[in-house]
Image: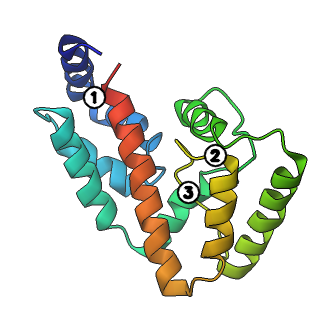
Amino acid sequence: MSVTRTADRLAWFNALSPDRAVQELTACCAVDEWARRVAAGRPYPDPAALRAAADAALADLDWPAVLRALAAHPRIGERARGGSREAVWSRREQSAAATGDEEVRAALVAGNLAYEERFGHVFLIRATGRSAEEVLAALRARLGNDEETERAVVRAELGEIVALRVTGLVTP
């Protein structure tokens, strides 16, 4: 990755119309108020400043807004459909956690259902860089969390996903 190309991508993002910037950011986190706040902070001098603004805006979201963000994520092991930037990112993020092991795949399906029954929303984890077995182990461990602990874990995982996506938005 060249600095010039990153600078070009950041300049592109900074120059977008407010509506287009919100549209691009919504692919990173499907919460309009988050995207509007981050877009309003432009121009950003560098990707780190953009990420810091994204992190701060994410930290300020209330739980109903976090749930809206979660609703845009497919279950672990399910392929996001469509050609949107968010769907493409989701498929790429989950590709490392894909498995040909039928037993692991079945355990992920069962675990997803148990998690959704327990917590009322999709199981969210940064799958990038994790194997299917690691995702399954985390899923099983998190089923033992109380509501407050799990909300903190969900926020942290969402933050990691959003950080990866925001970085991907402005780096080639």
Q: Secondary structure at mark 3?
A: loop
**Who comes first in sequence, dot 3 or dot 1?**
1
Is 60 positioned to the left or the right of 148 in the image?
Answer: left
Q: Nearer the viewer, mark 2 or mark 3?
A: 2
Foreground tag (2 vs 1): 2
Is tag 2's residue or tag 1's residue first in the polypeptide sequence?
Answer: 1
Residue 46 relative to residue 81: left or right: left
Q: How far across and how far down the image is residue 171, in percent?
A: 32, 24
Q: Position of residue 87 (x, y in %)?
A: 61, 35
Labels 2 & 1 near each other (Cβ < 8 A) = no
Quadrant containing the N terminus in the rendered view: top left
Tag 1: Cα neighbours inside 10 Å, few (<14), some, or many (≥20)?
few
| Residue 144 occupies quadrant | bottom right
Does dot 1 land on a helix, a strand or a loop?
A: loop
Q: Which mark is residue 125?
A: 3
Give the residue type that dot 1 points to. Ser
Question: Which residue is drawn at the image coordinates 59% and 30% (left, top)?
Answer: 88
The three-letter code of the residue at mark 2 reads Ser
Compared with 49, 154 (above or below) is below
Q: Which residue is mark 1?
A: 17
Q: Which mark is residue 131?
A: 2
Local SS, label 2: loop
Of residues 40 and 107, the one drawn nearer to the viewer in this rendering: 107
Which residue is pictured at 30% across the width and 65% down the height?
59
- Mark 3 neighbour class, 10 Å CA radius: few under 14, some 14 to 19, many 20 or more: many
Across and down, in percent, residue 64 comes to: 49, 72
Mark 2, Cα crowd under 10 Å, few <14 / some 14-19 / many 20+, is: some
Per the model, the C-alpha gap separating discs 3 and 1 is 32 Å
Mark 2 or mark 3: whose residue is earlier in sequence: 3
Of 6 and 1, nearer the camera is 1
